[in-house]
Amino acid sequence: MEGFTDFLSLLELRPHLKTNASFLVLNSLALVNRSLELLGRHRRVLLYLDQDAAGRKVTERLLQSNLNCRDHSSLYKYYKDLNELLVARQGKAKQLRLGPVHGKRATGKQL
């Protein structure tokens, strides 16, 4: 993951990972080279990098490396990152709980 917010979002979206996984939060893609040795110590590496050009480039590079990496960005394929997906889901859930607002102006007053 690229940032700590993405890490927290992943734990919210996939709580079972808390008990059976190790995590590496890069905070910057510039730290990938420093992380290769650490990643190599793991049997499997799940990638949750951003969907922007830089994140896709690093994902492709890691997939082509001799590390056992798997790209898991399909989880949020229509969003920039995990946090954007989580925010969108929470917004939809809030809309469902509140239901549609009919007959009210933006100020909340009855028409």
Image (tube, rainbow, N blue to C red):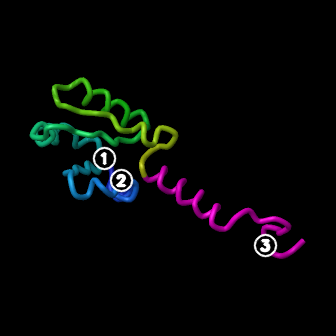
Report the magenta residues as a range. 83-111
Upstream in the sequence, badge 3 or badge 1? 1
Residue displayed at 24% across by 33% down:
69
Amino acid bearing label 3 = Thr
> Tag on residue 107?
3
> Tag on residue 32?
none
Upstream in the sequence, badge 2 or badge 3? 2
Expressed as whole percent of the image width and height from the top left, the position of residue 85 reads: 48, 50
Q: Is residue 96 above or below residue 74?
A: below
Amino acid bearing label 2 = Arg
Give the SS element for disc 2: loop
Amino acid bearing label 1 = Met
42 left or right of 84 in image: left
**Magenta segment: does it hold 89?**
yes
Neighbourhood count class around disc 2 (C-alpha, 10 Å): few under 14, some 14–19, many 20 upward: few
Mark 2 lies on residue: 14
Neighbourhood count class around disc 1 (C-alpha, 10 Å): few under 14, some 14–19, many 20 upward: many
Q: Nearer the viewer, mark 1 or mark 2?
A: 2
Give the SS element for disc 1: loop
Residue displayed at 35% across by 38% down:
72
Mark 1 lies on residue: 1
**Magenta segment: does it hold 107?**
yes
Neighbourhood count class around disc 3 (C-alpha, 10 Å): few under 14, some 14–19, many 20 upward: few
- Count how many numbered circles sit on residues in the image: 3
89 left or right of 17 in image: right
